[in-house]
Amino acid sequence: MNPEDLHKDVLEQLSKTLAGAQAISDEAKSHLRSAMMNTFSKLDLVTREEFDAQRAVLLRSREKIDALERQLAELEASLANP
């Protein structure tokens, strides 16, 4: 599970719990949500957009590496069999 999904799952579960707890005031809910967001902001999380962008860069790099490895193998083969 990626960090963003974990973040959403925790917030969703917390929201369900808080929605069911009638004794907790709106102000207390607001403070709790603020404290949770502050905690999440301290974690080493990235947004989905950042994750997707880095994944795309990694895929392009992998393709380039694969192409260079094929070229190297061809060059080595041509040098081995002049």
Image (cartoon, rainbow, N blue to C red):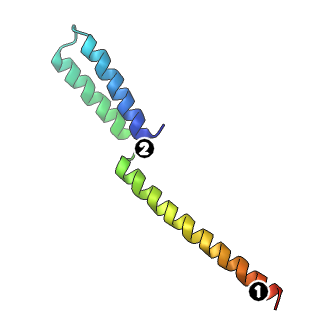
Which of the 4 quarters of the picture holds residue 32? top left
Question: Under tag 2, what secondary structure?
Answer: loop
Neighbours of disc 1 within 10 Å: few (<14), some (14-19), many (20+): few
Where is residue 45? Give x, y as percent: 40, 43
Q: What residue is shown with label 1?
A: 78
Where 18 sits versus 49, above or below? above
Quadrant in which the C terminus is drawn = bottom right
Where is residue 53? Give x, y as percent: 40, 57
- Residue at 42 percent of width and 33 percent of height: 6
Residue 2 as seen in the image, left or right of residue 20: right
Q: What residue is shown with label 2?
A: 44
Which residue is the extreme one toward the bottom? 82
Of 61 and 27, nearer the camera is: 61
Where 53 sits versus 60, above or below? above
**Amino acid at the residue labelled 1:** Ser
Q: Kindly indicate whether the residue at mark 2 contacts the one at mark 1 (C-beta within 8 angstroms).
A: no
Of 66 and 12, nearer the camera is: 66
Which residue is the extreme one toward the top? 23
Neighbours of disc 2 within 10 Å: few (<14), some (14-19), many (20+): few
Where is residue 7? Give x, y as percent: 38, 34
**Amino acid at the residue labelled 2:** Asp
- Residue at 44 percent of width and 57 percent of height: 54
Q: CA distance from mark 1 to mark 2?
A: 48 Å
Of 75 and 33, nearer the camera is: 75
